[in-house]
Image (spheres, grey):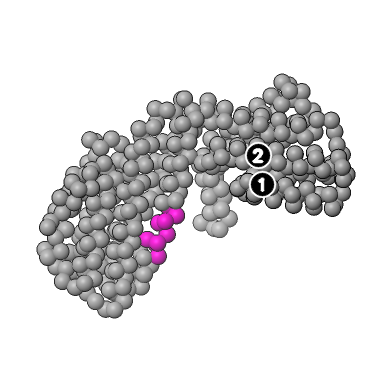
Amino acid sequence: MTTSGTAVRDGVLRIRTNSFAIFQCGIAAALAWIIAENLLGHPRPFFAPVAAVVCLGLSNTQRLRRMVELALGVTIGVGIAELLVAQIGNGWWQITLVVLISMSIAQLLGGGALMTTQSAVQSIFLAALPQTPGGGLYRWEDALIGGTTALLIVAFLPADPGRFVRKEAQDLIRELAAISAESAAVLRSGDAAQADAVLDRARRTQDDIQSWTDALRGGEEISRISPLRRRHQPELLRYRRGLTGLDRATRNLRVAVRRIAAALDTGAEMPMALADIFDHLAEILHLLEGEVGTAQERLVSTTALAALAARLDPGQLGAQSLSANVVVGQIRSVVVDLLGATGMDEHQARTLLPG
């Protein structure tokens, strides 16, 4: 496919992924305008829909924080401009002064990027434009209307928190399965360059972990705000437990792959039985991919992991070198971590390993 065709395909995929968030922003923008214009009588209240869209955004994470930062930033910017502009007038140096003071106060109060930026933007509006009766108060009220509207949309027109968390979890597990399968191929071929490529891929899994973490935080926030999504809290709790186990398993798998790459770089041979172990691990990860987020008693992958644990005897696998023993040790840790992700107690999981 051509580069332009790939770009179009990726763009369509992004639209599909974010379609519900885009729909929420559109509804929130219209509702914020209607409330500010018809209920409060604000003339052309453009900042109300702006505030609603800023608070919602395309990300499901930190919406409450965005609303608070937006409201505080507007309050600071409007307050500073109202106090100073009436005394010093409008102009370029007045804009400089109110921006410096507003942003400094926002930082003094521990504000993030949104709060600091909004304090500057609002002070610029009031310092640059002719003063109108109620201008500063209207802008502050519009910020509250926009933020409140955003929360109402999250509460009563919520996304499915389990759906997007599940997708991120499956993406990570699928990537770990691919890394395990490629590690098996590397062990059979003894190709050091290929081992380095697998290691690079394993290192990039930190981005997948962060994506799962962000999605889970967003889902948990939705389940707290929306009465319609409270029922998802047990499911999200299982995802939280699974994330902890998969995060640890990912790190241990990364160490195992690094040891394989280091051994092959020095020309050391690794026991071929380890390739079968990695293939077995890849198969189990594909099982777990389909079961992630489900209740423990329904997990086939738990039984499969227990069977793999029983095979992880360094002596029976022919692990005689330091590198081979390190790899076996890391895979043992991976299996324990994955069992923990499925809900098994860590001590119980360790008892399944050969002595």
Q: Please state the extent of the stretch shown in magenta in the rendering.
A: 200-208
Mark on residue 106? 1
SS type, badge 2: helix
| Circle 2: residue type | Leu
Quadrant location of residue 288? top left
In the image, residue 188 sits, relative to residue 113, either above or below, namely: below
Q: Residue furthest bottom?
A: 266
Q: Is residue 103 visible?
A: yes
Considering depth in this image, is 75 or 301 the residue closer to the camera?
75
Question: What is the x, y in percent for residue 217?
Answer: 46, 41
Mark on residue 72? 2
Mark on residue 67? none
SS type, badge 1: helix
Which residue: 18% across, 51% down? 350
Question: What is the x, y in percent for residue 319?
Answer: 16, 68
Q: Mark 1 or 2 closer to N-term?
A: 2
**Measured Cα–Cα span from mark 1 to mark 2:** 8 Å
In the image, residue 13 sits, relative to residue 46, either above or below, namely: below
